[in-house]
Image (cartoon, helix red, strand yellow):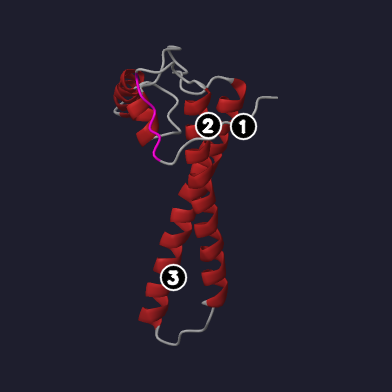
Amino acid sequence: MKAEVIVPDDYRPADDEPFMNDTQLAYFRRKLLDWKSELMSDSKETIETLQDNTRAIPDISDRASEETDRALELRTRDRQRKLVSKIDAALRRIEEGEYGYCEETGDPISLRRLDARPIATMSLEAQERHERREKVHRDD
């Protein structure tokens, strides 16, 4: 088992260092774990709020408004639940040594893209091709 790499708080992956070296992997692992922790905390708060705010509202307009707000909140949490699954998949790719490489071409995904979207599984070019193909098939 590898020794844990300490990443300075001001570290940013750079193109002039070896791609997906131990420091970069530790940086992205920490970034993903922090993101997941934030999402899980938000989710817990939502559950508590929904449980606390269960009350009978006599005015039908107010009740409809509150139900709409709840539905929106639940949709948001569902998207976040899916995002947590993608974060878990990215963490697995780090452990398996596949993180940072395009699943379509096998080429490295740019560090700027990974820093902006650490769950990315495709290079920008491959993602654009994928979205163009998806749009063409969706229009049929």
First in sequence, mark 1 or 2: give its number: 1
Q: Are marks 1 and 2 in contact (CB under 8 Å)?
A: yes
- Any magenta on residue 77? no
Q: Which residues are magenta?
A: 10-15
**Compared with residue 31, is residue 53 higher up or lower down, i.e. above or below?**
below
Residue tagged 3: 67
Residue tagged 2: 26
Residue 4, label in figure? 1
**Compared with residue 19, is residue 120 higher up or lower down, i.e. above or below?**
below
Residue type at numbered disc 3: Glu
- Any magenta on residue 14? yes
Q: How far apart are labels 1 and 2 at the CA level?
A: 8 Å
Q: Which of the two discs, 1 and 3, sits closer to the camera?
A: 1
**Compared with residue 52, is residue 44 higher up or lower down, i.e. above or below?**
above
Foreground residue among 47 and 96: 96
Q: Main secondary structure of the magenta part?
A: loop
Which picture quadrant has residue 107?
top left
Foreground residue among 83 and 35: 35
